[in-house]
Amino acid sequence: QVQLVESGGGLVQAGESLRLSCAASGNIFRVNTMGWYRQAPEKQRELVATITSGGSLNYADSVKGRFTISRDNAKNTVHLQMNALRPEDTAVYYCNAGVIRRDYVGMNYWGKGTLVTVSS
């Protein structure tokens, strides 16, 4: 089994910052692309940012210039530094990872999510 565990969510005021972290553990041979997605109430889950094992980045237009994704390949961790937060960033944030298991089977995994609430 592979587990993704997120941390770092919370309640902040508009303009403040938060840092989310996610650690992948378990039956892992290699972790490929890692990323963050979010789902606001009554909305579909949407991409926030992704980072490949080689460091290629992709951001949603709504977070460009405010959020920064990074990863530590040795620790199988991914982070999301969120600055200048806005009330519309309020959502449950989910970690995602494409994992090659030790049996060389590739699977896509999700964390359970961490709530970010931004008050105006």
Image (tube, helix red, strand yellow):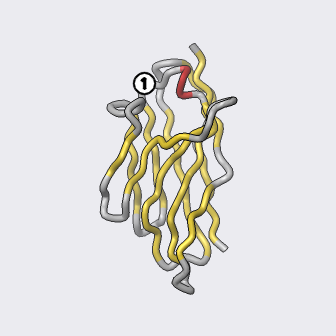
Does residue 69 lie above or below 9 as drawn?
Answer: below
**Is 113 situated above or below 9?**
below
Q: Is residue 12 left or right of residue 55?
A: right
Residue at x 45% of width, y 34% of height: 82
Question: Horizontal and vertical percent for residue 9?
Answer: 60, 38
Give the quadrant of the N terminus: bottom right
Q: Residue at x 33, y 50 (%)?
A: 57
* Residue lying at the far top of the rendered structure: 120
Are there few (<14), some (14-19), or many (20+) residues within 10 Å of tag 1? some
Relative horizontal placement of residue 7, taking residue 83 as reference (left or right): right
Tell me which residue sits at (41%, 32%) in the image.
63
Picture quadrant of residue 28:
bottom right
Q: Is residue 120 left or right of residue 113?
A: left
Please report the residue visible at 48 percent of the width from the left and 59 percent of the height from the top.
77
Residue 118 drawn at (x, y percent): 58, 23
Task: Name the foreground residue: 36 vs 72.
Answer: 36
Give coordinates of residue 59: x percent, y percent: 38, 41
Instruction: Give amino acid for label 1.
Output: Ala
Q: Which residue is mark 1?
A: 84
**Quadrant housing the C terminus:** top right
Q: Secondary structure at mark 1?
A: loop
